[in-house]
Image (cartoon, grey):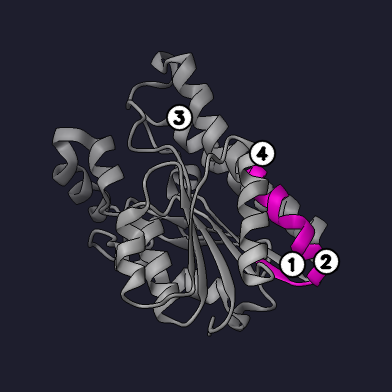
Amino acid sequence: MVKDKVIIVTGAARGLGQKYSIEFAKAGASIVFADISDCSDTELKIGEISKNYLNLTLDVTDLESCNSMMQKAVEKFGTIDVIVNNAALYGALKSSRFEDIDPNQWDKAMNVNVKGLWNCCKAVSPIMRKNKNGSIINIASLAAKFGMPYAADYATSKAAVIGLTRVMAREMGKDNIRVNAVAPSMVRTESAKEFLGEKAERGFEVISKGQILQKTLEVDDIYGTILYLASDQSKFVTGQTLMVDGGSVLL
């Protein structure tokens, strides 16, 4: 489904981003995995599968860093077919009532989760427009649709991702570029555990009980949706937010 495609995955040092990168490599894609953190573990795992990869350091809040990522990807692989905008600030955010959120934390969440995604999309836009083809996959969250309490900064940033996805889809459609979002419920990742703290397991249990499918979303449960949007199987799907939430909200 994605064999021979060139795919960028941001936020790939661990968790979901690492999973996407590994599975795309297994499927025969050329992978550019990038993160502000060290991606050596991701490289080690992908290196056992494929030699068609590029490990890059990326600060999504810096447009020059995003442009450099794009340029290096094109230099190595000749093009970019797909980008998965997975990088986000989540686990490091302190949970609190909306009026108690530290202004600096609010700004950091918006800078990484919204501006960072915008920067990455700006960076890949020229090559995709030139090719008249591409798939942009933005990682949103159930938090935006549900209104996640005690996480107003995170939920608001992900609502912005959904809004930006819709605008970009309309603006880029004439160039045959598809732009979609994926909104998972809370996934059992290290970031989620960091966010929930000591109450992590209790938090997963409460969330799963609010779903039609009453189980905790695992890393393996997301990739199929990402693969679908990256492949030509979804070539007539754009501007959508696909909920991967076990039936928490019904659109």
- N-terminal of the pair, mark 4 or mark 1, is 4
Q: Which mark is residue 63?
A: 4
Residue 101 on image: x %, y %? 41, 18
- Pick the front one: 3 or 180: 3
Is residue 163 something one can see in this rendering? no
Residue type at numbered disc 3: Ala
Q: CA distance from mark 1 to mark 3?
A: 31 Å
Residue 40 on image: x %, y %? 33, 54
Instruction: Please provide the residue range marked out in magenta.
Output: 118-135
Which is closer to the viewer, label 1 or label 2? 2
CB within 8 Å, label 4 to label 1: no
Residue 49 shown left or right of residue 178 in the figure: left
Is residue 207 something one can see in this rendering? yes
Q: CA distance from mark 4 to mark 1?
A: 21 Å
Which is closer to the viewer, label 2 or label 3? 2
Q: CA distance from mark 4 to mark 2?
A: 20 Å
Residue, disc 1 = 177
Residue, disc 2 = 130
Q: Quadrant of residue 171?
A: bottom right
The rendered magenta stretch, by its main secondary structure, is classed as helix
